Amino acid sequence: MSVTGLCQICEQNEAEHSCSNCGTLACEEHWDEALGLCAQCAATVERGEGGDGTVRPDDLDDDEVMRF
Ligand SMILES: [Zn+2]
Ligand SMILES: [Zn+2]
């Protein structure tokens, strides 16, 4: 996957990645390789906010919980 354009966070470096969460183009500096997210989304995840697409135990039905 190649991305064309400037990083939308610093607007200085060439973007190397496109965030799968918000679509922001991010350069190497503003890309969290471990999370696969831009720096903005990575910061949000690390603060424990957001969570879209993340299954939490609370989302499971009681039957599902019982199996564990
Ligand atoms: Zn950048
Ligand atoms: Zn993002």
Image (tube, helix red, strand yellow):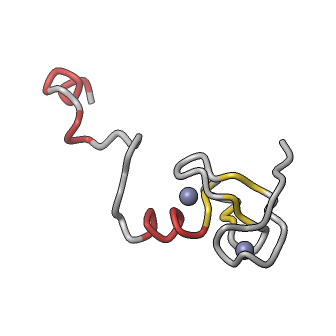
Residue 45 appears at what percent x and percent y? 44, 62
Q: Would you identify the image quadrant in which residue 33 lies?
A: bottom right
Q: Going by the image, does 31 lie left or right of 57?
A: right
Q: Residue at x 53, y 49 (%)?
A: 21
Q: Quadrant of the N terminus?
A: top right
Q: Residue at x 27, y 30 (%)?
A: 68
Q: Residue at x 38, y 46 (%)?
A: 52
Q: Going by the image, does 37 lie left or right of 5?
A: left
Q: Going by the image, does 47 lie left or right of 35?
A: left
Q: How many marks?
A: 0
Q: Would you identify the image quadrant in which residue 60 lies?
A: top left
Q: State the residue lying farthest toward the left.
A: 62
Q: Residue at x 78, y 66 (%)?
A: 6
Q: Is residue 60 above or below residue 34?
A: above
Residue 9 appears at what percent x and percent y? 64, 73
Q: Is residue 43 above or below residue 25?
A: below
Q: Going by the image, does 41 lie left or right of 52?
A: right
Residue 24 appears at what percent x and percent y? 62, 57
Which quadrant of the figure shows ligand 2? Answer: bottom right
Residue 25 appears at what percent x and percent y? 69, 59
